[in-house]
Amino acid sequence: MKFLAQASAALALLGGTLANPVAFDDLMTPTAPLKRAQQALKQVTNFGENSSKTKMYIYVPSKLADSPAVIVAIHYCTGSAQAYYNGSPYAQLADQKGFVVIYPESPYSGTCWDVSSKAALTHNGGGDSNSIANMVTYALQQYKGDASKVFVTGSSSGAMMTNVIAATYPEMFTAGIAYSGTAAGCFYSQSGGADQWNNSCANGQARGTPQVWAKMVTDMYPGYNGSRPKMQIYHGSSDTTLAPANYNETIKQWCGVFGYDYTKPDSTKANSPQSGYTTYSWGDHLVGIYAQGVGHTVPIRGSDDMKFFGL
Ligand SMILES: *[C@@H]1O[C@H](CO)[C@@H](O)[C@H](O)[C@H]1NC(C)=O
Ligand SMILES: *[C@@H]1O[C@H](CO)[C@@H](O)[C@H](O)[C@H]1NC(C)=O
Ligand SMILES: *[C@@H]1O[C@H](CO)[C@@H](O)[C@H](O)[C@H]1NC(C)=O
Ligand SMILES: *[C@@H]1O[C@H](CO)[C@@H](O)[C@H](O)[C@H]1NC(C)=O
């Protein structure tokens, strides 16, 4: 626990009381009604080591590409694999593009993800992140997938897990897209608990320098020196569940990891990709999209996600 205790001690916690953990509600509201996927979602019960008891569901389109890409799509608190399959566009996109979608399902009551325990915040630590990585290994083998096209995305708690997965399994993922999450390690629990709510992070009081946030990422897989996934971070300015300050802290984290100056994006595009949204980009590894006036549910932009993933 030492590494995170040190890193989190370096974060300034600006006041704030720690109330009891609260569950939060996060409904997926896609912009347009979705067409139904052609195939059903299937559970896989033999994907490998699974000490956190995370469940695996998979969507395999009838027209599977040769050497298909693999997308991990991670649900929000109160959600499920089935709810995310129904409410997000990835299965329909798989029908068009021939990739495989893994929908992991949280083993915890309330179905938030464990992004607070040392196990979850460590490469091969035995937490949910480890189980999800094992699902990817299984899918790559089972479907002869393209290991250079493995992606992760999620909403809310699933977006927190997206950042955690990118930090703990950088060698496995090519790109990640987080819709309304928090920086990797921001939900760290001092008592070491799994699946703990962290009010100071949720309320936007956990602030750090890019260096402090980046160290949290690099400490999750000590000694790793290879490439890391490029990241795209969405957040709404009217988010009352995970305060908008989490947008900047997450941007600072990945800027710290990639060596970008977070105060100087290479480009800033107003009203992009739609009115009220601003798109910021740094180098070829980081895009931030801040959605003015949007609450906790930033609608998933399926075709933009495909572009970011290069699919
Ligand atoms: C993982 O644990 C869940 C919950 O116990 C179970 O449903 C699933 O079959 C397990 N999968 C593996 C591969 O052990
Ligand atoms: C919440 O997370 C921050 C890091 O973001 C950490 O400093 C703080 O101790 C955590 N709170 C609890 C109650 O563990
Ligand atoms: C990167 O890590 C690998 C595996 O641990 C090691 O063999 C290699 O020497 C490291 N490279 C550098 C530049 O540190
Ligand atoms: C994020 O940081 C920028 C630049 O420092 C600042 O202008 C903006 O107000 C911050 N946004 C939030 C939501 O804290």
Image (spheres, rainbow, N blue to C red):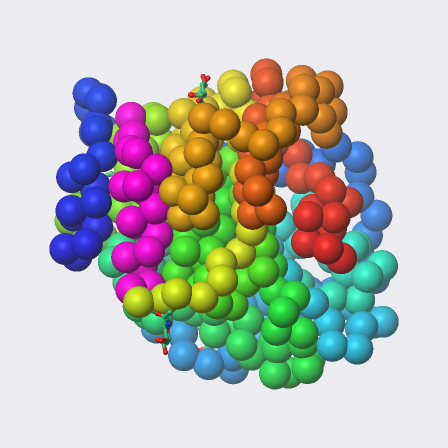
Residue 211 is inside the magenta segment: yes
- Against 63, residue 196 (above or below) is above
Q: Position of residue 178 (x, y in %)?
A: 54, 43
Query: Count the marks: how many?
Result: 0
Q: Quadrant of residue 301?
A: top right
In the figure, is residue 87 to the left or right of 209? right
Q: Position of residue 274 (x, y in %)?
A: 74, 25
| Residue at point 34%, 26% (across, down) | 203
Residue 181 is inside the magenta segment: no
* Residue 302 in view here: no
Q: Position of residue 265 (x, y in %)?
A: 54, 30
| Residue at point 28%, 37% (across, down) | 198
Quarter containing ligand 2? top left
> Which of the pair 268/26 is nearer the observer?
268
Q: Which residues are magenta?
A: 205-222
> Which of the pair 234/187 is nearer the observer?
234
Quarter of the image with the C terminus is bottom right
- Against 81, residue 266 (above or below) is above
In the figure, is residue 177 to the left or right of 120? right
Q: Position of residue 149 (x, y in %)?
A: 65, 66
In the figure, is residue 99 to the left or right of 121? right
Quarter of the image with the N terminus is bottom left
Q: Quadrant of residue 92?
A: bottom right
| Residue at point 60%, 46% (across, down) | 284
* Residue 5 in view here: yes
| Residue at point 18%, 37% (across, down) | 10
